[in-house]
Image: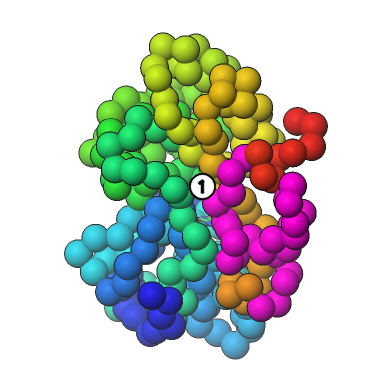
Amino acid sequence: MKKIFDTKIILNEEVAKNIYRLVVEADIDGKPGQFVNVQLGSNEFTLRRPFGIAMLDSDRLTMFYRVVGKGTKFLTTCKAGDEINLLAPLGNGFNFEVGEKILLVGGGLGLAPLLYAAAKIKNADIFIGGRNSEEVIFWQNEFKSYAENISVMTDDGSYGHKGFVTDELPEALTTTNYKKIFVCGPEIMMRKVAAIAKEKNISCQVSFEKRMACGLGACLSCSIDTINSRKKVCKDGPIFNADEVFYNEV
Ligand SMILES: Cc1cc2nc3c(=O)[nH]c(=O)nc-3n(C[C@H](O)[C@H](O)[C@H](O)COP(=O)(O)OP(=O)(O)OC[C@H]3O[C@@H](n4cnc5c(N)ncnc54)[C@H](O)[C@@H]3O)c2cc1C
């Protein structure tokens, strides 16, 4: 059930350049793929900022964020013990059965919701994509406890295979009988993964990111066109079947 509540920060640490792990006390339920709307302390920030649920256990909620603008910059100044207000859980979440053979494909901070997905699915494999070694090594360590097989790719070749997650995808889909693919990352990556999945006839769910305000489906600021109708990313998504949102040319 959705809740709006004040809570305490347990940890806010930089895990790679400009990437932070934020752990807060939270007694909530949440599915992989759902997100949290975070109120930033000062009056300067009217709108909450959305972040994916990266882990939810023992009344602790973990999120990872990249510093990109004023709000996330402000968040870096928050310390353990500080109070923070959350609206959670929001959105729909991935659709899966525990134990299904699923391939997770993530790029950058898109890996955050996939971590919680890996923990819940139990035997998922993960393709981790990032700009460089610093951006992928901590993710690899995070996924070690939850994913069965981990493949890492970097744009600059400084760690794992050089290239994009899509380079090795066709072969992986041939050697392992994946039932579904869940992908979260830059739109271009999601479109390419979706196209490969379609070619191989594998169901693909994507996590859509759109600037949003209320997070509750009321303000319509995150509306998108889908194959059937106009939908709200915050309420009908952020998880969509790839065919529904990527119906035009890749
Ligand atoms: C469902 C969802 C889940 C997300 N999960 C994560 C995550 O786990 N980790 C992470 O680092 N980032 C995530 N993002 C992106 C994150 O919300 C933005 O990077 C953040 O809001 C930027 O805030 P800012 O004030 O630093 O940037 P500014 O650009 O100054 O923000 C200005 C306004 O735009 C909104 N905004 C800016 N960028 C985005 C964006 N990409 N998506 C939605 N709203 C945006 C902000 O909420 C704010 O209202 C997610 C976005 C969505 C929609």
Question: Looking at numbered disc 1 in the image, what kind of residue is underneath it?
Answer: Leu
Residue at x 79%, y 32% (from the top left corner) = 249
- State yes or no: Cβ of the residue under disc 1 lies below 8 Å from any atom of ligand 1: yes
Give the quarter of the image for residue 205. Answer: top right
Q: Determine if the magenta segment contains residue 229.
A: yes
Residue at x 57%, y 19% (from the top left corner) = 200
Give x and y (percent) for residue 213: 66, 73
Pointer 1 residue:
109
Quadrant housing the C terminus? top right
Image quadrant, ligand 1: bottom right
Q: Is residue 13 above or below residue 118?
A: below
Give x and y (percent) for residue 215: 59, 72
Depth check, front residue: 211 or 207: 207
Give the quarter of the image for residue 26. Answer: bottom left
Can residue 138 be seen here? The reply is no
Give x and y (percent) for residue 4: 43, 83
The kind of secondary structure element at disc 1 is helix
